[in-house]
Amino acid sequence: MKNKLSFISIFTLCIALSLTACGVKQASTTDSKNTQTEAGSEASGKSDSRLDDLYQQENQLFADHADVWNKAFGMMNKSDADPNGNYADYLAGTVESNKNSFTDDELKTLNEDIETIRKIEEQIAELENKNTSSDDNKKDSSKASSVFSDFSGEDFDGNKVDDSLFSGNAVTVVNFWFTGCKPCVAELSKLNELNEAIKSMGGEVVGINTETFDGNKTAIKEAASVLESQGVKYRNLSIDSSSDAGKYASEIMAFPTTILVDRNGNIVGEPMLGGIDNKDNYDTLMKQIQSVIDADSTNK
């Protein structure tokens, strides 16, 4: 089942909002049904299917009114959001604080969509409360934090990469993106700048393009061309979609998303949602990077 953190990432600053261009994804289900009784499995499957449907309803609203939502998403600030709150409240607050930037018709469309989203969110919360226990949450959190502990992949030149990538750095900044995502491409040059800035600090930026999974040669060629056009020099990797890291990436619902990984391959802190070409996001990420580096120095 999709956790709240993954779902709330839908609000990432995705300027090119659409189901194909923004990376908004349908929620995935877990494999835990294998350990349940036949009756329990059937009930769980129905619940997961219902959640998928609710997520898709929200995605479709954004796609149906993409122009006005593009405008609204461009005004959003990740740091203002409450991951435990109703997503509709966050959207409504953004629209209200920027209402002078919209026409009357745009405001009408946004507010109508927000009220629909509010009702969908209430149904999602009810389903999640029924199906998620505190023990499950702890297990999922532990699993998510260690998805890079047994890592393997290849860079776009075919060179093998393993978890020594992380052990050799005080902090590794992992950026998830895909070629058709305009906000992802827009931040690439800034990520390259960040990579140069943190090298001397014991840090490194690594990109994972989700279209290049399983060594997809066509996708790798296209991604490499985009990287070259943006002057990107930091490593980008293709990973196995069935690996822990691949499964983690497959559950990201919006792009770009950036995470920090420590020397032991553990994810540290919360994902950075939205491009770091936004100054606030860049400054916030730099503070988080410094925090991980400081902790690494203390633990030596």
Image (cartoon, rainbow, N blue to C red):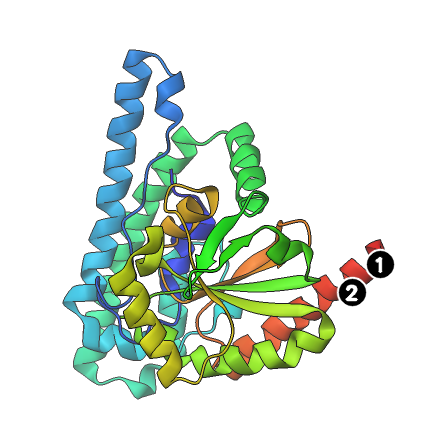
Q: Residue at x 22, y 85 (%)?
A: 103
SS class, disc 1? helix
Q: Position of residue 31 (x, y in %)?
A: 37, 29
Q: Is residue 14 visible?
A: yes
Helix or strand or loop: what does disc 2 sit on? helix
Residue 118 relative to residue 130: left or right: left
Question: Is disc 1 in contact with disc 2, using a CB cutoff of under 8 Å?
Answer: yes
The residue singled out by tag 2 in the image is: 294
Residue under label 1: 298
Q: Amino acid under label 2?
A: Asp
Q: From this viewpoint, is residue 183 visible?
A: no
- In whole angstroms, how far apart are the C-alphas of marks 1 and 2? 6 Å
State whether residue 255 is above or below residue 86: below
Please say if 53 is above or below 65.
above
Q: Residues within 10 Å of mark 1 (few under 14, many from 20)?
A: few
Dot 2: within a 10 Å radius of its alpha carbon, few (fewer than 14), some, or many (20 or more) residues?
A: some
Q: Quadrant of residue 116?
A: bottom left
